[in-house]
Image: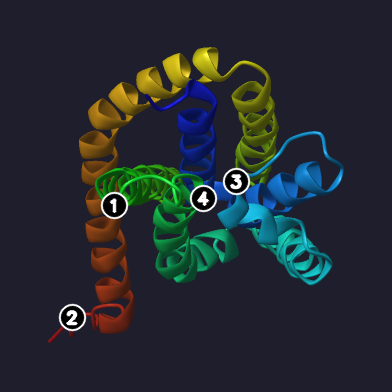
Amino acid sequence: MIAAPSIALAGVLSWASGFRLYAALFLAGMLDRLQWVHLPPALAVLSHTPVLIATGALLVIEFLMDKVPAVDSAWDGVQTFVRVPFGALLAWGVFAHATPEVQAIAAILGGALAAGTHVAKAGTRALVNTSPEPFSNWGLSFSEDGVLLAGMWLAFAHPVAFLVLLGLFVLALVWLLPKLWRGVLALRRGLTRLFSRAEAGPEAPLRRH
């Protein structure tokens, strides 16, 4: 039988990969380095000094990128090709000692969870960035930082409670994503019409005879 702490670890790493990948990697590696938690053998590499330096540097870059409106959306677009595969890889790493069937299920679910979280994060940012002031973006970004820290702590300290909240999050995500997607499509259509009018230029004034 698979223990709840292992499921919680796979869940929190996949979930966090969708919006704060490098922070999750750095925190997990540092906690293991300080021996406050013990990562599975396949993920122990996260606590090695070169990896900590790399994830720490990327953490700082992502922290700064995420605080600049429009730049954060561009960053999210690029990170699509990193966050989702890492979500699957980290979940697989937690169960690298298990049977191939368990490993496959973990990778599929981990990738799906990372993808869902990433789409929700990127879509929300795209809508928020339509606001001319940066404070909404900053507030949302700092909130995500706090949610990550709380989620990581809860997964290690109270794995069952984390799994319950993660289940509720997934249900909310299933409800939210279609609405968020429609909002992003509406925003895209509006921007397309706006740029089309700008390229066409003002209409020429009518001549009076």
Quarter of the image where one finds residue 43: bottom right
Crowding near the residue tagged with mark 4, few <14, some 14–19, many ≥20 C-alpha atoms within 10 Å: many
* Residue at mark 4: 17
* Residue of label 1: 100
**Residue 40, labelled with which disc?**
3
Q: Do the residues under discs 1 and 4 have CB atoms within 8 angstroms? A: no
Amino acid type at circle 1 is Pro
Q: Return the disc, 2 or 4, that comes first in the chain's sequence.
A: 4
* Amino acid tagged 3: Pro
For the residues marked 3 and 2, what is the alpha-carbon distance in whole angstroms?
Answer: 75 Å
Q: Amino acid at mark 2?
A: Leu
Q: How many marks?
A: 4
Q: Specify whether residue 202 is in view.
A: yes
Which secondary structure lies at badge 2?
A: loop
Q: Secondary structure at mark 1?
A: helix
Q: Tell me the distance, in whole angstroms, between the alpha carbons under discs 1 and 4.
A: 23 Å
**Which-is-in-front pick, marks 3 and 2?**
3
